[in-house]
Image (tube, helix red, strand yellow):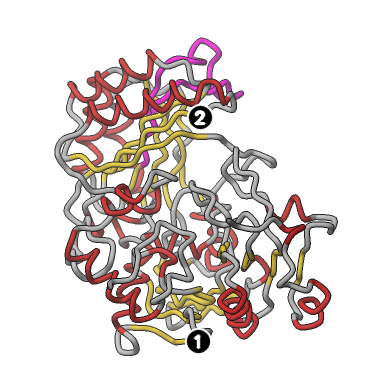
């Protein structure tokens, strides 16, 4: 049984404060409740202490304290884990939020970034030099979590996943050692952290490749969601040049000021588009999408890439039921299935999110990184969001039913979008050879499974 903070006797908060230059936050401190809150709603865990290290040496010390005391260790970059892995009940939270240094080598097209930075902070800073590294589609996500899971975002088809642009990393392993890993140094560990999540240690810094992305042609394009429009949109996304990445949300139109009132609540295609290249070519690339139907909203325009991450609503903590999967195609029949299921749900917000992959994602060999789904052409994420706990079971059935109806035989899953769904779903994220290789690396660097508050890969026995 895990002890509650009030019962914990193995930690001395005054001693911790004397030892660390970084912040130590205890249950009685002002700001404790804010510090233990993660992005997903419905997670209410009370850690014994939250430590925000000032540097890698302090990260190593926190890891050693967790090992010595036996207290559960949660590692937090941005706190967006769908399973709430960024906070522990009665354990130690190692929160990287204060480690935000960024060293940009403009001429060398690389950047060393500490893991407490968010995607929007990093993107804005390198964007001032006309450069970019692709992360996801949400600015408040910590670069640590999204990188270790793979990183699927607006630049994926042109420049690959985030892990495809990871050149090196500094990582503290379970024994408190700090390693520099790259293609030549500890290549097994470097391979594993590119898609294997936080199973192998605490990455304190990442070295990323930077690309020239001065601006994009991007933004939201909203169209009526008929089966024909949805299927045609997916065909156009697959045929588009690699510079085009899109995130297609089929969902009820939200009552936003820029959405005409007659469309509020109706099922629409709300697509987030990005063309990473010349503005004139970008406008030409967007033409086939605009031609599918008269747009309800067309906010696609040339803009700095950093503006693809809009500000998020403060205090927004959605309670969501989710399912991630891969499919081969979304034809009119599959599109009709999506529309029918969306119309049958009463969740305040429900969505089938469709991402055409391919391009640079598929150019990487499947065994080159722990993310192995290189040839899966479309990622689908089904979600229902509702704060009413009495509706959770019904929404779970709805999500499960729609995912089953869309199943085309690809049993894989993207680890970055798995919630608290059990060990079998973690196995779905990795083909058997990848899983076995990851388990062996886990045994080498974390044989006692100290880093288990994650989508866990137990060490090989």
| Contact, mark 1 vs mark 2 (Cβ under 8 Å) | no
Q: Residue furthest front?
A: 1
**Label ID, residue 194:** none
| Residue 198 lies in the magenta stretch | no
Q: Residue at image x 56%, y 77%?
A: 67
Whether residue 433 sits left or right of residue 192 in the image: it is: left
Of labels 1 and 2, earlier in sequence is 1
Q: Residue at image x 45%, y 34%?
A: 321
Q: Mark 1 Cα within 10 Å, few/some/many (few <14, many 20+)?
A: some
Q: Residue at image x 68%, y 69%?
A: 98
Whether residue 334 sits left or right of residue 169 in the image: it is: left
**Quarter of the rendering containing residue 228:** top left
Q: Secondary structure at mark 2?
A: strand
- Looking at the image, residue 245 lies above or below residue 366: above
**Quarter of the rendering containing residue 211:** bottom left
Q: Residue at image x 34%, y 47%?
A: 282
**Residue picked out by circle 2:** 385
* Magenta-highlighted residues: 247-269
The residues bearing labels 1 and 2 have C-alpha atoms spaced at a distance of 40 Å
**Residue picked out by circle 1:** 178
Q: Secondary structure at mark 1?
A: strand
């Amino acid at each position: 049984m895990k002890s509650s903070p009030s019962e914990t006797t193995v930690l001395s908060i005054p001693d911790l404060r004397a030892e660390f230059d970084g912040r130590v936050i205890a249950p009685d401190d002002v700001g404790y409740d804010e510090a233990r809150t993660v992005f997903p709603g419905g997670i209410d865990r009370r850690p014994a202490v939250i430590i925000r290290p000032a540097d890698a040496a302090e990260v190593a010390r926190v890891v050693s304290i967790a090992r010595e005391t036996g207290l559960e260790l949660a590692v937090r970059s941005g706190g967006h884990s769908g399973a709430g892995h960024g906070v522990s009940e009665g354990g130690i939270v190692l929160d990287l939020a204060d480690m935000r240094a960024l060293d940009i080598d403009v001429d060398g097209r690389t950047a060393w970034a500490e893991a407490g930075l968010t995607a929007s902070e990093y993107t804005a800073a390198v964007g001032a030099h006309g450069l970019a590294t692709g992360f996801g589609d949400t600015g408040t996500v910590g670069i640590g979590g999204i990188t270790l899971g793979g990183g699927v975002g607006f630049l994926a088809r042109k420049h690959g996943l985030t892990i495809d642009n990871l050149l090196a990393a500094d990582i503290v392993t379970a024994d408190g050692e700090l390693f520099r890993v790259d293609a030549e140094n500890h290549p097994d560990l470097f391979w594993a952290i590119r898609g294997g999540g936080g199973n192998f240690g605490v990455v304190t810094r990442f070295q990323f490749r930077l690309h020239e992305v001065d601006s994009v042609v991007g933004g939201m394009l909203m169209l009526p969601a008929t089966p024909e429009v949805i299927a045609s949109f997916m065909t156009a996304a697959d045929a588009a040049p690699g510079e085009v990445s899109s995130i297609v949300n089929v969902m009820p139109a939200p009552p936003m000021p820029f959405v005409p009132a007659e469309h509020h609540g109706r099922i629409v295609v709300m697509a987030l588009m990005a063309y990473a290249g010349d503005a004139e070519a970008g406008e030409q690339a967007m033409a086939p999408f605009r031609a599918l139907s008269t747009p309800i909203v067309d906010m696609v325009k040339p803009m700095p890439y950093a503006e693809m991450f809009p500000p998020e609503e403060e205090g927004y903590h959605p309670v969501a039921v989710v399912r991630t999967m891969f499919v081969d195609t979304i034809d009119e029949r599959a599109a009709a299935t999506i529309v029918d299921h969306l119309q049958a749900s009463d969740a305040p917000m429900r969505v089938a999110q469709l991402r055409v992959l391919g391009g640079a994602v598929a150019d990487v060999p499947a065994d080159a990184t722990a993310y192995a789904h290189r040839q899966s052409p479309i990622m689908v994420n089904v979600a229902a969001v509702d704060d009413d706990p009495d509706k959770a079971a019904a929404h779970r059935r709805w999500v499960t039913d729609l995912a089953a109806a869309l199943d085309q035989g690809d049993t894989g899953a993207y680890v970055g979008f798995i919630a608290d769904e059990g060990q079998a779903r973690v196995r779905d994220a990795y083909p058997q050879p990848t899983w076995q290789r990851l388990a062996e690396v886990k045994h080498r660097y974390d044989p006692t499974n100290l880093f288990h508050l994650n989508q866990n890969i137990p060490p090989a026995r």
